[in-house]
Image: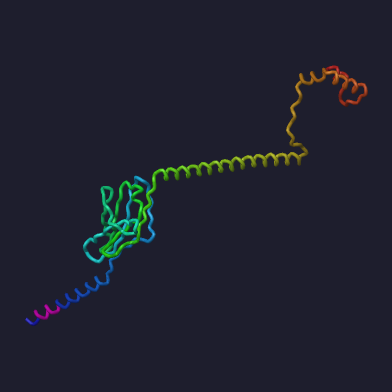
Amino acid sequence: MFNNYFGKFFIGIILLHLGMKTKGQEADCLPHVRVHRNTVMNASSGEDLRMECPVHFCSDAQPVISWCKLDDSNNCSPFNRSARTETHWQNLTYNTGISFLNMKDVSTNDTGQYRCQYRSDLSHSIKIIVSERADITTTLYEKTEKKILHDIVNVAWIVLFTVLTVVCMVLFGCWALRDKGKTCSAPVPPLEGTAMQAMSGTPEVQSIIERAVETDSLTGIDEDYVNDV
């Protein structure tokens, strides 16, 4: 019997020690939310949006997280849920998890600052900016215009490089011909026979040819050539 009482006493001390340890752990646990400061999310009208609220809690039960939206007076009013919004919870570890706020088909009216709350701990604001689709279209147009301009500049550089390459090759060829005692001038096409005959038929040309033959001043032209002309 003595051993039986001693065993119960020993078990009671162990249970008391475990209870005090558990109470100490709960006292050391501080539940809080972990939304980063200056969080900003952008969306366009008609898109879906999801906000996250990481939570550290101290009990085995799933924590109850509430969401609110700052009004014009900077008061965080309870978020009005609708068919477009829903919340759900995801456990990460035994004492951490994430509360999600899903918004479907957002509009510019959804622009604002949102917060999540667990017990007395209120998170930093999550800034939501919803823009019209026209803004997105304009942005895409501007990006396309810049890309086209960039392509035109690239083509211009390629053409300029090609022209400079051709010019350098021509200049190098002329330099090589000059070293060989040749010229790099373009050949002059000979006058057609009909044009020469038309010129020689004029009185002025005939007079010049006759004077040249008489004075022998035109080198390389004899009477037979003159008669042929």
Q: Please provide the residue range marked out in magenta.
A: 4-10
Percent x, y of residue 12: 14, 77
Furthest residue to the right? 215
Main SS type for the magenta part?
Answer: helix
Q: Is residue 8 magenta?
A: yes
* Left or right of residue 1, residue 179 in this image: right
Colour pattern of the rendering: rainbow
Residue 5 visible from this viewpoint: yes
Q: Which quarter of the figure has residue 31?
A: bottom left
Whole-percent x, y for residue 119 in the image: 26, 64
Q: Say if the magenta span includes residue 206.
A: no
Which residue is nearer to you in this view: 141 or 214?
A: 141
Q: Which of the 4 image quadrants contains residue 14?
A: bottom left
Observer-nearest of 72 and 87: 72
**Residue 222 shows up from this direction:** no
Nearer-the-camera pick, 156 or 109:
109
| 49 to 162, vertically: above or below | below
Please provide percent x and percent y for residue 216. 92, 24
